[in-house]
Amino acid sequence: MSFLGKLDRLVYATGFDRIMFMKVEPLTYRWTPLLVLASLVAGYVVMAKAEMAHFPSSRFFVGWALFYGAYLVTAFLRVFGPRFIGTNSRPLDERELMVKARAYAISGVAITGFTMLGCAYMAIASAGLWTLWAPRTPNDWIALALGIQALAMLLPTWIASWIEPRLTADHDD
């Protein structure tokens, strides 16, 4: 058996083919995204506080692990959550298209509003008028950008999970 054949068998043995070919039933995550969002914020705050001390400490690495772990979970929630992308064998139906459009519209407005407030705060903080905290190091800015990206991935999934009806058990079984 060739090397590519062995890799192909490995994909099917691990079950990764179900993810890759979107054979997994979509799940609704109603409260899990809130925990992931709290982990993102907590990890960012711990990293930023540790960097203000100007030396890497164990708290920085804990914050780093919390932040980037939550970022990774965000990507998995997006894959296993409500369907936003159809496949050739199972395209999105009208209800799924409506849920997707509403979720992206609501999350787009929310992210834009939060980003505008953040930009206004950064302008006020750079002028020295009112400063609670402002990003100083490149790592702070990069983590802030990745946090906004994670929010852009997480919020539509969260909103679509609340828009979709809850799965009910079949009482005939």
Image (cartoon, rainbow, N blue to C red):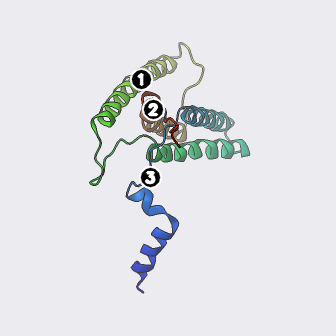
Dot 2 amino acid type: Leu
Q: Residue at x 66, y 36 (%)?
A: 46
Residue 100 left/right relative to 147 = left
The residue identified by callout 3 is: 24
Chain-order first, disc 3 or disc 1: 3
Q: Quadrant of residue 7?
A: bottom left
Q: Nearer the viewer, mark 1 or mark 2?
A: 2
Instruction: Please tell me how crowded label 2 is: few (under 14), some (14-19), or many (20+) other residues with Cα within 10 Å.
Output: many
Residue 73 left/right relative to 25 = right
Q: Residue at x 40, y 58 (%)?
A: 20
- Dot 2 lies on which element? helix
Chain-order first, disc 1 or disc 2: 1
Q: Which dot marks residue 140?
A: none
Quick one: 138 or 73, which is closer to the camera?
Answer: 73
Dot 3 amino acid type: Val
The residue identified by callout 1 is: 110
The residue identified by callout 2 is: 155
In the figure, 58 relative to 44: above or below? below
